[in-house]
Amino acid sequence: FGSAELRISPLVAHYPCYVVSLSRLRTLGRLVSHGRAKRLGLLEELTATSRSPHSAASFFVSHEWEGADHPDNHANTKLRWLQSLDRHVGVGHAEVWIWLDYLCVPQEPGAKRRRALASLCCYANLCSRFVPLVRSPAAWSRLYGHGAEPPGALPGTLHSYLARAWSRLELCAALSPKY
């Protein structure tokens, strides 16, 4: 990352680990960038000792962006799925928190973004649960229609997701022993 002080560690966050509560995420009609989420007061800082948000109820969501400027598609399927996360994973009525790169990491190039990216292993360690957000090729076709397939692997499918270096890094970080 171009700086000796940015040593990657599962214990050191060079930029705060921000998460959004499921109840706040449900107020959105479209995913917003980190800067806007901060301005709207949607984000909370997750630490190893914070009680609310709490690591045991925090989900690190790994995914493949579907557009060049926005991670979701025209139908907002990622946002809608995330807004129902508690039902998908059987959490019940307790509050849960979500880490998603677009919401929780500065999107503008610069020092804050570099520090956040160097903290991914720490973020994956702080969030006790890991969700790789992928869909089957059949689900992709239902969403976009037959004949709309781009060349190569369909974006958001497991095959395409696993071909990305960032996805593999996030998977390795999530599978590393927790402290």
Image (cartoon, rainbow, N blue to C red):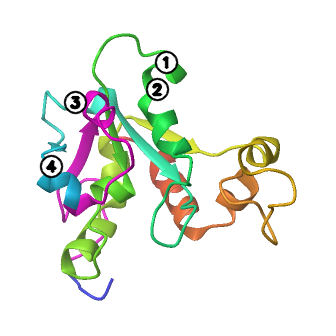
Q: Mark 1: give few (<14), some (14-19) or many (20+) Cα within 10 Å.
A: few
Q: Spatial distance from mark 4 to mark 1, Cα to Cα?
A: 26 Å
In the rendered structure, find residue 40 and report the number of the disc placed on it. 4
Name which residue type carries label 4.
Answer: Leu
Main secondary structure along the magenta-highlighted residues: loop
Residue 177 in view: no
The answer to whether marks 2 and 1 mark residues whose Cβ atoms lie closer than 8 Å is yes
The residue under the point 13% across, 27% down is 51
Residues rendered magenta in the picture: 6-35
Residue under circle 1? 87
Q: Mark 4: give few (<14), some (14-19) or many (20+) Cα within 10 Å.
A: few
User: Does 166 appear in magenta?
Assistant: no
The residue under the point 29% across, 61% down is 105
The answer to whether marks 2 and 4 mark residues whose Cβ atoms lie closer than 8 Å is no
- The image quadrant of residue 7 is bottom left
Which of 8/63 is in front? 63
Name which residue type carries label 3.
Answer: His
Residue under circle 3? 54
The answer to whether marks 3 and 4 mark residues whose Cβ atoms lie closer than 8 Å is no
Which of 143/65 is in front? 143
Q: Spatial distance from mark 3 to mark 2, Cα to Cα?
A: 19 Å
Left or right of 140 on screen, residue 37: left
